[in-house]
Image (spheres, rainbow, N blue to C red):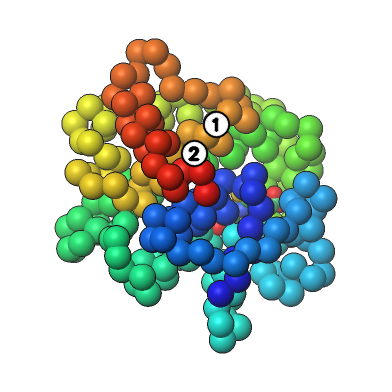
Amino acid sequence: MLLYDFKMAPNARRVRVFAAEKGLDIPMQEVDLGNRAQLGADYLAVNPMGEVPALVLDDGTVLTESTAICRYLEEVYPDPPLCGRNPLERAQMMMWDRRVEQHGFAAVAEGFRNGNPFFKDRSVTGTTDFAQLPELAERGKQRFANFLELMEQRLGESEFVGGDRFSIADITALITIDFARTIKGAIGEHQPNLKRWYGAVNGRPSAKA
Ligand SMILES: N[C@@H](CCC(=O)N[C@@H](CS)C(=O)NCC(=O)O)C(=O)O
């Protein structure tokens, strides 16, 4: 296997943390998003979507989309389980993972890509250029603040985001909250449950992946 990666890219980190939790040591190749290498012919031949991560299997099959890559790794390397051990647990963990993606990760991406000059005309990933919309930069920050409140409430009733076990939902939430530094978003003093959870999850060796 070969993982196309970029150290600063949160979706790529999501796969790195997931693989580290599984004890996997997957060879990696850096795609320099800082120099737009994701849009060069060499990388587009690997992933025509122009995004990282991408996982190339030993038979040459290319998997993209971080959730799909994690699900594949879960099937092939089931221990430790990170996506639930039975139908209900799987559904609950995927439900929370999706909530984190839609209300947390998408909010930060919206805020960052519409507010940072580096992304001028690149407010959306992929091969089509889209102009920035300053209103979306502001909206992203507000949506992220709402997301933190949702997480604070959830973590007041549950040890981990997806339930009583560490799961993919915690990984997605961790990379989302770290990504939020790009919009100056952070857990507040009034959010003790989130703080407790962040300390535990960020303290796992996989968080350094
Ligand atoms: N749905 C994709 C999204 C991947 C994505 O947005 N990757 C970003 C890095 S985190 C990227 O490749 N950006 C390229 C760009 O900015 O043009 C996934 O989950 O893998």
> Which quadrant would residue 29 be assigned to in this image?
bottom right
Q: Residue at x 60, y 67 (%)?
A: 27
User: Secondary structure beneath disc 1?
Assistant: helix
| Residue designated by label 2 | 176
Horizontal placement of 198 versus 2: left or right?
left
Q: Residue at x 59, y 39 (%)?
A: 109
Horizontal placement of 185 versus 39: left or right?
left
Q: Position of residue 40 (x, y in %)?
A: 82, 64
Q: Is residue 85 visible?
A: yes
| Viewport quadrant of the N terminus | bottom right
The disc at residue 76 is none
* Real-space CA distance between mark 1 and mark 2, rounded to the nearest whole angstrom: 6 Å
Q: Amino acid at mark 2?
A: Thr
> Which quadrant would residue 173 be assigned to in this image?
top left
Which residue is at the far top?
189
> Pointer 1: residues within 10 angstroms few (<14), some, or many (20+)?
many
Q: Residue at x 28, y 60 (%)?
A: 81
> Pointer 2: residues within 10 angstroms few (<14), some, or many (20+)?
many
Q: Amino acid at mark 1?
A: Ala
Q: Foreground: 115 or 65?
A: 65
Q: Is residue 151 visible?
A: no
Q: Residue at x 60, y 83 (%)?
A: 60
Q: Is residue 124 above or below residue 78?
A: above
User: Secondary structure beneath disc 2?
Assistant: helix
Q: Position of residue 32 (x, y in %)?
A: 76, 53
| Residue designated by label 1 | 180
Tags 1 and 2 touching, CB below 8 Å: yes
